[in-house]
Amino acid sequence: MNFFIAAVRRELILALRRRSDIVNPLAFFLMVAVMFPLAVSPEPKFLAQVAPGVIWVAALLACLLSADGIFRSDFDDGSLEQILVSPQPLVLVVLAKVLSHWIISGFCLALMSPLLAMMLFLPSEGLGALILSLLLGTPTLSLLGAIGAGLTVGLRKGGILISLLILPLYIPVLIFGAGTVQAGAMGLPIAGYLALLGALLVLSMMLAPFAIAAALKISVRG
Amino acid sequence: MLEVKNLFCERDERVLFSHLSFSINSGEVVQIEGQNGSGKTTLLRILCGLSEAYEGELFWQKKGMAEVLDDYFRQMLYVGHLAGVKSSLTAEENLAWMQQLDPALNKVNIAEALKSVGLYGFEDVPCYTLSAGQQRRVGLARLYLSTAPLWILDEPFTALDKQGVAEKEALLAQHVLKGGSVILTTHHDLNVPGHKVRHINLDEVAHS
């Protein structure tokens, strides 16, 4: 447990020293909300209708944007090799990395989402649904993204490949995530949607760390 | 300690080494030699479990490597040609993380290890402000911390100055004297005080 905490701490310190890692996904998220009404229509009624989908797509792409870097720097400077030859279980390191990736991407996106909701005229009834769905959905995105990052970290240019690998897996999260917000905005019960998002999270939390660890071993030993 | 039997490795349809067998006993320094691209790094990566692109058998303390891998990782220290030093962390933070990864790095405390590698006063500056040689020293500070009996070092002296190399050679001698053993590659003329270095030349075993 101490080791896990130390690993999360190291990741967060590293992220804080490279601010762009934190700012990039958030700036992207915000820019979509700024550009979208300019490009399509500033009509509040129209925006309120598309807001759940737009916010969720923006959050998903922001997560994907930062997923590529989860293992990149550790691979480049040899830290990953050291992790692999250490007696500590790789799965723990992987979980720590995914958790800190979620804190700097998904969690911050969820905190920022009320601002976007206001900019896109999302009805206030949908606000709780938006935050809850992002909090439950984005950890799954981080876990799945890390599988792709692990598989492509050994390649010189994995950026496009990771999108191809991961986007299909993101789709269920997107459907249920945006669905939650849509239902919430219309004042319908959202418990069912949230339960599905939770189930996706539990499933990926159980399986993804092992897949990520295996992917990293393949990438380094390949 | 470590035994290699009938190792075969090819890369891009070129045989790097075949029928390579040797063993390393405690108290020995083994230098792997060969020209660039002869497979020195590949061999070291195989020995420390970072590569599976080989045929043949590896034994640690007379047991098959796969059975005792956890135990092996605890008793082996690997310093690759990438040092595993994070440039945005300070020297102290880097070593603290290495200690978390490998609890066997507890011979002395971090401050003392940094003093031994000549980085006294540089503990709390981010590593990207250090020179290449100083960054290398941060990675090598692990050697002063390590209680592991087997050291596998890939080009450990790159970017070090003459005095730094001499200090590391003295450290290797001390380690070997205590019954440890070292496998390393280097293009530097290795001179471990008081010990004979065994050479394994990969150019010679390539097609034998």
Image (spheres, rainbow, N blue to C red):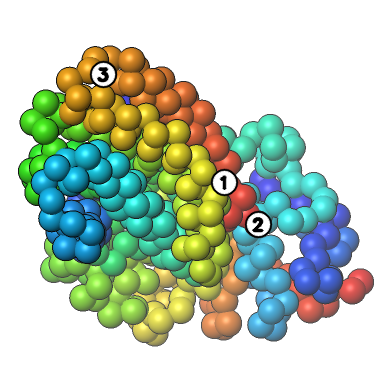
Viewer-nearest of discs 1 and 3? 3
* Residue B90 in view (yes/no): no
Viewer-nearest of discs 3 and 2? 3
Q: Residues within 10 Å of mark 3 (few under 14, many from 20)?
A: many
Compute the Cα span from label 1 to label 3. 35 Å
The image's mark for residue A215 is 1
In the displayed image of the protein, which residue is found farthest to the right? B208
- The location of residue B109, given as percent across then percent down, is 25, 49
Compute the Cα span from label 3 to label 2. 45 Å
The disc, 1 or 2, on the residue closer to the chain's N-terminal end is 1
Type of amino acid under label 3: Ile
- The location of residue A76, given as percent across then percent down, is 44, 65
Which residue in the protein does label 2 denote? A222
Q: Residues within 10 Å of mark 1 (few under 14, many from 20)?
A: many
The image's mark for residue A190 is 3
Residue A141 in the image: above or below residue A156: above
Compute the Cα span from label 1 to label 2. 10 Å
Residue in front for this viewpoint, B67 or B11: B11
* Residue at x 63% of width, y 61% of height: B44
Helix, strand, or loop for circle 2?
A: loop
Same subunit, labels 1 and 3: the answer reads yes
Type of amino acid under label 2: Gly
Q: Chain of mark 1?
A: A
* Residue A130 in view (yes/no): yes
Same subunit, labels 1 and 2: the answer reads yes
In the shown orientation, is residue A145 left or right of residue A31? right
- The location of residue A212, given as percent across then percent down, is 51, 41
- The location of residue A157, given as percent across then percent down, is 51, 68
Type of amino acid under label 1: Ala
The image's mark for residue B77 is none
